[in-house]
Amino acid sequence: MSSIDDALSGREVVWGTDNLFKSYTVARGDVEAAFAGAPIVVEGEYETGSQEQLYIEPNGMLAIADLQNGVTVWGSMQCPYYVHRALAGLFNLPAEKIRVVQMETGGGFGGKEEYPSIIAGHAALLAWKSGRPVKIVYSRAEDMVATTKRHPSRTKHRTAVTRDGRLLAMDVDFVIDGGAYCTLSPVVLSRGTIHAAGPYRCDHVRIRGRAVATNVPPHGAFRGFGAPQSIFALERHMDRVAAAVGLGPDEFRRRNFVHAGDTLAVGQVIREPVSMNTLLDRALALAGYHDKRRRFVEENGTRAIKKGIGFSTFMHGAGFTGSGEDHLASVVAVEATREGVVRVLAASTEIGQGTNTIFSQIAAEALGIDPDDVEVVQPDTSEVPNSGPTVVHHALVDAGVLPSVHSRAEFRAACRRYVDSYGTLRATSRYQPPPGVRWDDQTYQGDAYGTYAWAAYVAEVSVDTTTYEIRVDDFVAVQEVGKVINPTLAMGQIEGGVAQGVGWALYEDVVWREGRMANAQMTNYIMPTSMDLPEIRVHFEEVPYPYGPAGAKGIGELPMDGPAPAIFNAVEHATGISATRLPLTPERLMELMCASPAV
Amino acid sequence: MRTPLHRYELTACDSLQDALAALAADPSARPFAGGTDLMVLMDAGHLPPGRYIDLWKVRELRDIDVTAEAVTLGALTTYTEVLKAEILRREFPMLGIAAAETGGIATQNRGTIGGNIANASPAADTPPALVAYDAELELVSSRGVRRVAYEKFHTGYKKMDLAPGELIARVRLPRGRKGWRDYYRKVGTRKAQAISKVCFAAAADVADGRVRDLRVALGSVAPTVVRCTATETTVRGHAVDDAVVVKAQRALASEIEPIDDIRSTAAYRLRVAQNVLREFLTRIRA
């Protein structure tokens, strides 16, 4: 069983009674009644493939384990406390006998959330048995073959609209392939399900989300957590609904965007200001969308290279889904040393995204000290508290012995005075949800996230009809992510996410043969190089989020959501080909173009 | 699994005489030039253990020699050297385009023309250009020197007209191509660091609206690089028009054998080869 269809057919059962790891249903209004009276109904089916994270550094672990000292592992990972919990279970040892240290980690993208527990387990068991330290470092090929990747997905949409383009009802069937074992699939499915109806106002919505079991290696966490899959389907579908109604893709969306005070499919009322129209206006203006939309059609004619432009509009929930943050009850600590250095203790890891810089920056600003005087402690479960895998929320507590404006010397003196008089100066802070946030895991209704980031992405493409190659020529990414704490890091996150999105949309194809990855080399698993990528123009609208750290929402996952549908919409503009399955490799585009009499 | 290093023996030679003697003395010894293919095989655990003769310091295999009749490249000429050679840029520009699209800079600094030919990959980027330029190979061994037309050199998948103990010494490109027009297109899996799915090189001598002579060669569409003589025949002597294009495309389909593999499909390779042929013919028509 290697596909979603195989799993759903039930011909063979490899998990439970129905091959389902997990299912959710979001229900709002009366969908069937709304469809019954609808003048226009548009259906569509969309598929996305798997994707390898391709972090720069492959997975690796070093373990020492014996009866006397317990188990210690050092390694490349995102979530030290996941590994800690796994080892405690595996060895049946008390928590204090397990020590997990995160070493400098060369990227993760979700690929080092759950899988490092497995490698740590292998290394630790071998160390236990042999009485010797054991190091396991995967080669690139081993890493690609063995570790978790993005879940493939299939989404069916049925949408009812009025003749003037207002959404009446949305019926969405979202399925992801979890592979042979249950990883973080329920969490991935959850985010994908909640994002499946997008930033649109619709009174009658039904979203059915299912994660199925197959015989391929397990899929797992990957930047975006299911949202890129369901948003790809939705934003491709919205262009087709717009066409069915006879409206431009932008005008159709404008008639349906949510505004402050509106209610999302999960019943969440949007409390903060949101202006999708402003984001879309700005993105389209920066891209020269309206002019190009008209001009490309006139110019393409018989040219071998056809140009197109398209966009997507979307949102991304900040932080953990639903009650996730409450369950995690993340803790972060700060400690001032006698020498006046402030140490931040958190299990949230630096994996290349700039966490340490941001932590230093937030702590320094809160305390009125220089970021150089802040030290972010290496995540080590014997030292840092369990702040879960999340980002720290306004964690820092005033030491209480300082005027609000002070010099470095005064700060150091105050620290020395405090430590000498009272001992360790340490404060911990536990995550508190924003007031009024409620979520019901049973009905899947409520405030799915504390808040959302909002975005409009525009892609301009060239399609070479000689070779069926698609090139993204220009990319505009406009988003509202709360307060941007560090503009350089924020731009880097968006650019990197867009690049990964371009790869997912056009190049990266995990080829399965009998359940194994057949192209586990970087020569044959094609990720785009800088030569294949356009200039990525990043712009932020800043609306500080009162409950976020220093006014920020989330940023890392968001840019994975928008590129693929924007590119596909642009390809349709260029060629008339309405592609529904990614990646859109030249081979697939050729099949579609040869099957279409129009081109 | 990688073979342990101690199972390899690398003998470095600094003259052609030494290298040929070493190869003659041990028939199982294999030549090692820039290593850009062999080291990949080694990393993947596919490089047979045994004796290798390192040719990197063999001076005689290195220079680019220019006479009135020909430009001759030593087999150890690297892609970087190809890119720098003014005479090649002027008279054999497809070699530079191919070199620039081969691997990354590190590979271009170590990879050699002779090594690329001896690796005999049907997906290599330079061979189609060499065929289109009527290249001739000079092969040397302790027994002497012989010359073969490059288009006859590859006899099957990874098979070639190269005897044990014999080295590719030089690649000779005949000059006198005034008036010929070149066309090269690599269709790879991406814009850089890519392996070809279709690699097309062609050259045509066009006068008074007629194609007096032409060469069409393709890589990645058969077990070896192929010179498409049937395609050439449909065009030679004619003015290019739509009917000629269609005939040529049909002839092309009869003389290439593309396959489905990890990088592409037979259907894609066939159609893109035909499309690229059309693009070439359209260019020389204009």
Image (spheres, grey):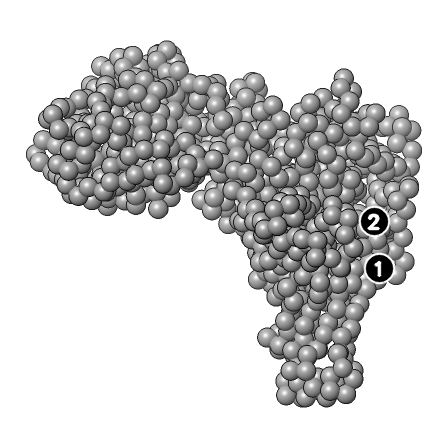
| Local secondary structure at mark 2 | loop
The span from disc 1 to disc 2 (Cα, nearest Å) is 11 Å
Q: Quadrant of residue B62?
A: top left
> Residue at position x 77%, y 87% from top?
A421
Number of disc labels: 2
Say if A139 sits above or below A392 in the image: above
Disc 1 residue crowd, few under 14, some 14–19, many 20+, Cα 10 Å: some
Label 2 is placed on what type of residue? Gly
Pointer 1 or 2: first along the chain: 2
Residue A318 horizontal/vertical position (percent): 75, 53
Residue A353 horizontal/vertical position (percent): 60, 57
Between B237 and A29, the residue placed more toward the observer is: A29
Say if A186 sits above or below A332 in the image: above
Q: Chain of mark 2?
A: A
Label 1 is placed on what type of residue? Pro
Between B140 and A69, the residue placed more toward the observer is: A69
Q: Which residue is mark 2?
A: A322
> Residue at position x 34%, y 42% from top?
B107
Say if A326 sits above or below A364 in the image: above
Q: Which residue is mark 1?
A: A433
Residue A504 is at least partly visible in this image: no
Between A456 and A69, the residue placed more toward the observer is: A69
> Residue at position x 80%, y 30% from top?
A20
Q: Chain of mark 1?
A: A
Residue A394 horizontal/vertical position (percent): 76, 67
Between A368 and A399, the residue placed more toward the observer is: A399
Answer with left or right where residue B246 lies relative to residue A187: left
